[in-house]
Image: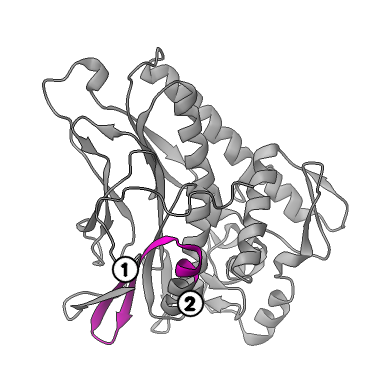
Amino acid sequence: MSSVLFSLKHILLLILPAILILWHVIPGYHATLSVQSISGKTMGTRYQVLFYPGRTNTSPDNLKVHIEQVLFELNRQMSHWQPASEISRFNRLSDTQWFTVSEDFYSVVKMAQTISRMTQGSFDITIAPLVNAWGFGPEQSDQPLTAVPDDKTLEVLKSTVNYKSLEIHPEKTQIRKLKPLSIDLSAIAKGYAVDQLAALLEQYQIENYLVEIGGEIKSKGKKPHSHWKIAIETPQPAVRQAFQAIHMPLLGCAAATSGNYRNFYTLANQTYAHTINPSTARPTDNSLMSVTVFHRFTAVADALATAFMVMGPEKSLAFAQSLQLTVFLIAAQDDELSITHFPEKFEPGLTSCRNSGLFLQ
């Protein structure tokens, strides 16, 4: 464990957490060594795919068609903003009958439940009623809150939040409610989508790529003469500036950052952030400002980053150490910025993705 302090006297605490992609095209290379870029909109944000064609025979235009098809299908399944999506239809169910879902949906829920158990509920996809109550869900998308929910309302809603009340069929792609509840996959779906796009690229024999959706990133291979390079942003509002540059490993790795500086609102001089603590039914209230998790699977990194925001810096670091996960934590400490990471010797040039076998089962 290593910790460094920086002055925060000129840095506001409402900051924008993200991962920057640091890259440039090296002139003079043949077409097979020229970076190709595909981008568009998805999941309420944007996606970007950078790659070197190598041995692939497909064109960027054809590849974009297939990328859009994958993203369209995942949105059809997991977007709680679409009334006809699988997740929206499941959330409207009032009984405990088994509900058949697509294979991707089933895989995401199964992974989410595993992470919920490991984090003892700090990550919980049944958080949806509280997300809506605090104004961060689809039910409040057009009408901002004029008052925060009262204690009685929160107590009632909290009683419906428990990942143990969501059951997964052991043999069929089905899930069911053991009591009334609704789910929200926002904290894992983008990461899963990144993993699926990376798998698509490899199907086309593309071995050097970087995929990003809303700041969740997965890369493999390298650019000519250098690794793919990303950067955790400087904790300063409205400024996209690199804080910590990282060279991604050649064999592939994912990175996901979570924080409460982009999606928040202020009422009566009190700021409320979008990450909700399932155990308190309220927005997180700890010193952790930003956490970046590195893992073989983007979906896992995505979900764990959210769980760590709920846990706070000390518990997050202990959890990461117990599983040998690479993490980079930024916390507020009085007027200073505390940087903590694991492993203690945090290499800007990562040589491998630690604990890459986690969640292979």
Amino acid carrying mark 2 in the image:
Lys
Please check the rendered image and state whether residue 165 is part of the magenta-colored stretch, yes or no: no
Q: Secondary structure at mark 1?
A: loop
Residue sitting at the far top: 57
Q: CA distance from mark 2 to mark 1?
A: 16 Å
Which residue is depicted at the point 38% across and 15% down?
59
Which residue is depicted at the point 23% across and 22% down?
33
Residue sitting at the far left: 28
Please check the rendered image and state whether residue 322 is part of the magenta-colored stretch, yes or no: yes
- As drawn, 126 above or below 81: below
Splitting the image into 4 quarters, where does residue 179 fall? bottom right
Q: In the drawing, what numbered circle is on residue 315?
A: 2
Q: Which residues are magenta?
A: 319-341
- As drawn, 64 above or below 48: above
Residue wearing tag 1: 344
Query: Is 136 on the left-hand or right-hand side of 83?
Result: left
Quadrant (top left/top right/bottom left/bottom right) for the N terminus: bottom left
